Amino acid sequence: MRASRTNLTCTFLLILIAGNSTTIAQSPVSHVHGNAELNVVLMGQQLQVEFISPAINLLGFERPPITDVESATMNNTIKRLQHGGWLIDGVPSACQVSTEDFEAPFYEERESNKHDHEHESGKHEAEANSNFRVKYLYDCDAALKQQLRILAFDHYSGIETLTVQWIANQMQGYTQLSKNNPVLYLE
C-alpha cells in the first residue's frame, strides 16, 4: 500500500510539472475567472485529484468578506472543500477520502471602508488573484469507474469551464468540461 501511494504521488507530481509548463506556454496568467482546473491521477484503486479555482468562482468575490452573508459563504466554502465528497459523483462508499493538501485565500482584516479606499489599488492587486487549491486522495477497495461525473458545476455557479489534465491506466489526456458536459472519461 505504501509503495502504491508513493507511485501515485510521483505520477501526480509529473502531471503537475507537465501541466504547469503547458499552462505557462499557453498563457502567462492561469487565473481565469469562470475557469477552474482539475488534475486527476488514477492508479488501480487510488484516485488523486487536485482542484484549483479562483476565489471569485466559489465565493462571488476576491476580497475579504464584508457582510455576514459573505463571511458565511467563505466559511461554508472552506468546509465543503475540506471534504472530498462534494466533487465527484458515484465514488463508492468503500472509498476512504482524505484531504492531502488545502489552501484558501488569506485576507487580512481591514479597519474601515474609508481606509480601504485609500489603499485600494495596492491591496486590490495583491488580492486580485486569490485561489483555492485542494488535493484529495480517494483510496478504494475496488477499481473506480472510468467515467467520473464532476459536481463542481452543481455547487458553484461561478465555474463555467473546468480544464482537466488526467493520467489513468498508462494513458493521459487533456479536456475541458462544462455544466452541459460534466463527465470526465479516463480512457
Image (spheres, rainbow, N blue to C red):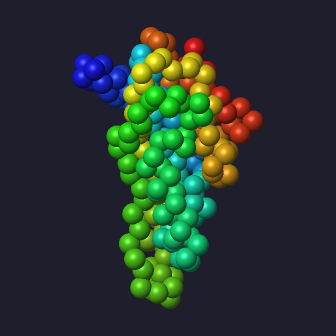
Residue at 51%, 71% (x, y): give it.
71
Instruction: Identify whether 163 is placed above or below 66.
Output: above
| The N terminus lies in quadrant | top left
Residue 4, x across and y down, in percent: 30, 19
Quarter of the image holding residue 141?
Answer: top left
Quadrant holding the C terminus: top right
Residue closest to the eye, 123 or 83: 83
Give above or below for 33 relative to 185.
Answer: below
Residue pushed farthest right? 180
Q: Give the residue drawn at x 71%, y 32%.
A: 181
Left or right of residue 71: residue 160: right
Question: Looking at the image, which residue sits at the far front?
Answer: 94
Please give the name of the residue rendered at 42% of the width and 16% of the height, measured from the top-left corner.
44
Q: Where is residue 128 in the image (x, y as percent from the top left)?
A: 50, 61
How far across and how far down the image is residue 122, in percent?
43, 71
Q: Can residue 31 be seen in this view?
A: no
Q: Nearer the viewer, residue 26 or 147?
A: 147
Quadrant in the rendering for residue 50 = top left
Q: Which of 153 and 23 is in front in this view?
A: 153
Q: Residue 167 placed where, x, y %?
A: 47, 20
Let me know if residue 171 appears in the view: yes
The extreme top residue here reads 170
Count the marks: how many?
0
Between 40 and 94, the one lying in front of the other is 94
